[in-house]
Image (cartoon, rainbow, N blue to C red):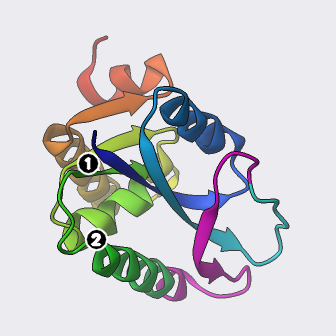
Amino acid sequence: MKKIVFIINTIPNQRCIKRINEFIDFGYDIAAYSFVREESPYLQPERFKIKIVGSLKKDKGYLNRVAILLNGIKYISNQYRNAKNIVFYYFGLDIALFATLLIRKKYLYEESDLSQTYISNIFVKALLNWLDKKIIRFSLETILTSEGFAIYHFRSI
């Protein structure tokens, strides 16, 4: 059976923990990695351990966040460089953007927020929408947590 390696953008995120527990319930071997917000306390889940690979600071800018995400994902990539029978599970566009660049393995993608829609620059928004669709197209499966996401991306359900 394949091992599923989850990369969570930030914990505590009960939706992500619930999803990982579902995989455990179906007998999958899992590993979980996450970033934390410096100001947000969290508890390790009961059924599995999440390895923290970076701490996001509230008062630092977006470039600092990108550097932390890149370093954390590079660390994870190095852990599984020669591994066989691995599938990655990316929670969120921010994780998927960098992970698809650094990790050359099959992946599942879960989208629970259209964060690019909050960006006012139409060129950046269009680029992120294009990249999001590309990530969706190349994933083994994509989980959209809202019917509205399918409408947004594909104008239909």
Looking at the image, the residue that sits furthest to the top is: 157
Identify the residue shown where x is 17% and y is 47%.
Answer: 134
Report if residue 117 is visible in the image. Answer: yes
State the mark number for residue 107.
1
Q: Is 114 rendered above or below residue 69?
A: above
Residue 97 image offset from top left, x and y in percent: 31, 62
Q: Is 154 rendered above or below residue 21?
A: above
109 to the left or right of 120: left
Query: What is the total number of numbered labels drawn onto the structure image?
Result: 2
Quarter holding the C terminus is: top left
- Label 1 sits on what residue type? Tyr
Near-viewer residue (108 or 82): 82
Residue at disc 2, secondary structure? loop
Near-viewer residue (91 or 60): 91
Report if residue 121 is visible in the image. Answer: no
- Label 2 sits on what residue type? Tyr
Q: Is 62 covered by the magenta stretch?
A: yes
Do callouts 1 and 2 mark residues in contact (Cβ within 8 Å)? no
Residue 17 image offset from top left, x and y in percent: 64, 43
Residue 151 image offset from top left, x and y in percent: 35, 20
Image quarter of residue 28: top left
Tell me where the magenta segment starts and ends, as one range: 45-65
Q: Is 52 covered by the magenta stretch?
A: yes
Q: Is 102 rendered above or below residue 6?
A: below
Residue at disc 1, secondary structure? strand
13 to the left or right of 90: right
Near-viewer residue (26 or 113): 26
Q: Residues within 10 Å of mark 1 (few under 14, many from 20)?
A: many
Identify the residue shown where x is 32% and y is 69%.
Answer: 98
State the mark number for residue 80.
2
Q: Residues within 10 Å of mark 2 (few under 14, many from 20)?
A: some
Identify the residue shown where x is 51% and y is 38%.
Answer: 112
